[in-house]
Amino acid sequence: MIPLLPTFRLSRPATLPEAFDLLADDGIAYVGGTELVAAMQLGLVSPAHLVDLKRIPALGGIRLEGEVLVIGSAVRHVEVADSELVRRSAPILARACAELGNARVRATGTVGGNLCFADPRSDVATALFALGARVRLRSADGERVLPIDEFVLGAMDVDLDEGELLDSVLVPVTVAPQVYLRHQPTEYPTIAVALVSDPEGLRVTVGAVGEIPQRFAAPSLDELDVEAILPELEVIEDLNGSESYKRHLVGVFVRRAAAELKESNDA
């Protein structure tokens, strides 16, 4: 039997100014609601006023602004996965959105909602940390831009002020070779690994094992020392595996990602 949701008021603004007024009236913003509804069913949250942002055109769309890929916060995972622009400019983000969760989550969940919920097992966050993305936040008082690692602070913890919402995600366009791999025995990944190789060196990002994605660097792909990374990881033990098991998996998947990256470089 599906648990009933608690009673709440629902507002559906069509513009950002309307949304800001409603957020000031104790409103809680949402778009896809995939994480929020589940939390409400479990009794973890009971918002009295929900503000549905789906009808606001300004929060949608995928476009280029110079050398920056701009993804609206209300863009669904399936739209990111299917976008030729994302596939060319940020391929590991397209891959992460194509593989996360299940078909229902990909069809209804959004990039902005995923980031704001800040689940430690977020594929989206792992890919965006690896790509050095930023987020644009807006409120009735103006806007601010933060690096992704200053926005996602911990498990279910983001730097979002009262009355503020996530407007868009800003991803630097790159042609750097990159790989995204994950191990997912259940709906959420046990570990996720992203490698990006650019002229400055190799960036290694490990997600789903700690509260936030963790970043490491190597001078080059050939100089990658996996054994030096593993002891530095912060690992949370849970039903998906012990600390030692997760460290082992990270080692396996970093090596697999490195092999895949080398193969693409040699092709």
Image (cartoon, helix red, strand yellow):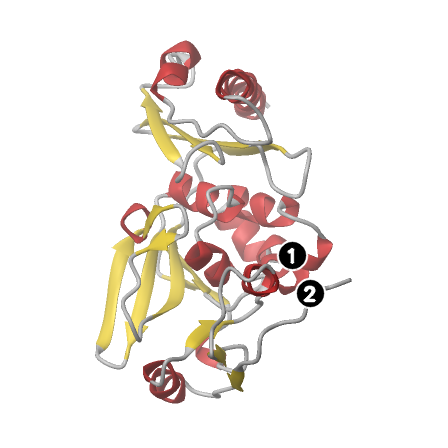
| Residue plotted at (51% across, 45% down) | 122
Q: For mark 2, does the 10 Å Cα neighbourhood hold few (<14), some (14 to 19), or many (20 or more) residues?
A: few
Q: Which mark is residue 3?
A: 2
Quick one: SS at disc 1?
helix
- Percent x, y for residue 69? 42, 57
Q: For mark 1, does the 10 Å Cα neighbourhood hold few (<14), some (14 to 19), or many (20 or more) residues?
A: many
| Residue plotted at (53% across, 81% down) | 8
| Residue plotted at (51% across, 41% down) | 121
Q: Circle 1 is placed at which residue position? A: 106
Q: To which quarter of the image does residue 67 belong?
A: bottom left
Q: Which mark is residue 262?
A: none
Tell me: residue 152, above or below residue 11: above
Residue type at tag 1: Arg
Tell me: residue 11, above or below residue 29: below
Quadrant of the drawing holding the N terminus:
bottom right
User: From the viewer's perspective, is the residue at label 2 or at label 1 nearer?
Assistant: 2
